Image: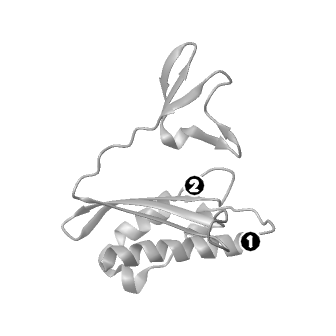
Amino acid sequence: MVAQGPNGERRIVATEFFQDLFETALTDNELLTAIEIPMANENQRFGFRELARRHGDYAMVGLCASSDWSSDNLTELRLAYFNVGPRPVLAEQTASDICRIWPQVRNEMSLDRLESELDPADDLNASSAMRVHLAKVLTRRVIEEWLS
């Protein structure tokens, strides 16, 4: 991410950009001027899912997933969830678990570790437990799409 301010240009790593609810790594006199996304290669797959009560509503939970492959083997996975806390959450342990069991993922996919990586708050739209459940549903949907 590229920020511009009176002191010039500054690059911010995406994992450090979101600090808290409505708070970013931008200083008071900076603007975000660009988001640079590397070109995907033929060994990468992506998934984006969100669940809302009605079409057009804010998502109760969302997932952005990216994966790297060698033949049919999953070599790297990134799972970034949103609306499960004050900032997006990268579920590194869950991703590691899925990579480790990838060949048997259909039979053994347990997303229990996700419960320890996400800490959503209860609100009028969904309870914390419901958001974690929905995050698991979205993860399974993305993986099922990759398997089909």
User: Is there a contact, CB below 8 Å, between mark 2 and mark 1?
Assistant: no
Q: Residue at x 62, y 71 (%)?
A: 55
* Few, some or many residues within 10 Å of mark 1 (<14, 14–19, 20+): some
Q: Quadrant of the C terminus?
A: bottom left
Q: Which residue is mark 2?
A: 89
User: Where is 125 relative to 41, above or below?
Assistant: below
Report which quarter residue 136 is drawn in: bottom right
Task: In this rendered view, identify the residue nearer to me: 94 or 86.
Answer: 86
Residue 71 as seen in the image, left or right of residue 126: left
Q: Position of residue 100 (x, y in %)?
A: 35, 69
- In the picture as drawn, the residue positioned furthest to the top comes out as 7
- In the picture as drawn, the residue positioned furthest to the front comes out as 56
* Few, some or many residues within 10 Å of mark 2 (<14, 14–19, 20+): some
User: Where is 141 relative to 44, above or below?
Assistant: below
- In the picture as drawn, the residue positioned furthest to the right comes out as 124
- In the picture as drawn, the residue positioned furthest to the bottom comes out as 107
- The amino acid type, in three-letter code, at marker 2 is Val
CA–CA distance between discs 2 and 1? Answer: 18 Å
Q: Position of residue 63 (x, y in %)?
A: 52, 63
Report which quarter residue 82 is drawn in: bottom right
Residue 58 as seen in the image, left or right of residue 11: right
Q: Is residue 44 visible?
A: yes
Task: In this rendered view, identify the residue nearer to me: 9 or 94.
Answer: 9
Q: Nearer the viewer, mark 2 or mark 1?
A: 1
- The amino acid type, in three-letter code, at marker 1 is Ala
Q: Residue at x 71, y 46 (%)?
A: 21
How is colour applied across the structure in the image?
one colour
Q: Residue at x 33, y 43 (%)?
A: 38
- Name the element at disc 2: strand
Residue 126 is marked as 1
